[in-house]
Image (cartoon, coloured by chain):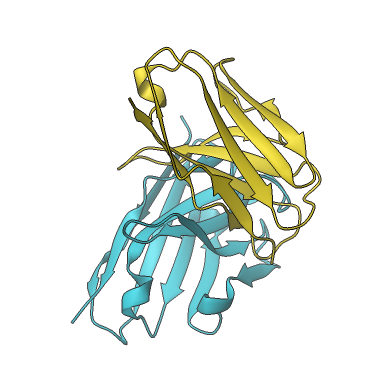
Chain colours: A yellow, B cyan
Amino acid sequence: EIVMTQSPATLSVFLGGGATLSCRASQSVSRSLAWYQHKPGQAPRLLIYDASTRATGVPARFSGSGSETEFTLTIRSLQSEDFAVYYCQQYYNWPPFTFGQGTKLEIK
Amino acid sequence: ELQLVESGGGLVKPGGSLRLSCVVSGFDFSNYNMNWVRQAPGKGLEWVSSISSSASSVSYADSMKGRFTISRDNAANSLYLQMNSLTADDTAIYFCSLDDYGASPFDYWGQGTLVTVSS
């Protein structure tokens, strides 16, 4: 099983600031890596797939990078609606599909 | 508009059973693989099970094997999860989601249904 590890667990950022979230895989997942945004009481939302491709309707302030075992989600000019929990997921080697434990992005 | 709506959650005693449903609208259900993912209280997302578009292939997380059964009815645009021998560790919000072809991200998700296992 591929273990996904996200850091930090919590990130506090000012409105308008930037955020960098990290995700590490225990073995190579090539570029088969997705990022999701999840707010309480809502459906998770796909943001990024194939490590760097934005899903339909995702603003350009969200960007993904990385390959193999190291990945990053970068959010520029944070808006109030961006504060949520973010998960990475690998879909390279399954079952099982595996998620990171999440990074909570909160307003400073 | 694409919609996934889960139902069937509720309170069940340890050792009991529950059947979850997910009704999908707004796209050609029979062309997509479907998945169940859960989130225990205060925890992250955990993949539960997947089923291919034709139901010819199913897979489960190890802790669910032998207890959970995933199925689908393409004529009814519906996905199901039969859960047996439930324990407190199965308490979670259960989400259904879809993906294009198996080795692909989960494009769309429902809002989830809460399952509580307690005596």
Q: Residue at x 68, y 65 (%)?
A: A95
Q: Front-most of A52 and B54?
A: A52
Q: Front-most of A38 and B79?
A: A38
Residue furthest left as drawn: B119
Look at the picture and state if A56 lies above or below A96.
above
Q: Position of residue B65 (x, y in %)?
A: 56, 80
Residue B32 appears in view: no
Q: Residue at x 68, y 44 (%)?
A: B100
Q: Position of residue A41 (x, y in %)?
A: 30, 42
- Tally the numbered discs: 0
Q: Front-most of A4 and A90?
A: A4
Q: Front-most of B5 and A102?
A: A102
Q: Position of residue A94 (x, y in %)?
A: 71, 62
Where does the C terminus of chain A fall, quadrant-wise? top left
Quadrant assignment, res A85: top left
Q: Position of residue B109 (x, y in %)?
A: 48, 44
Q: Residue at x 36, y 61 (%)?
A: B40
Look at the picture and state if A43 lies above or below B53.
above
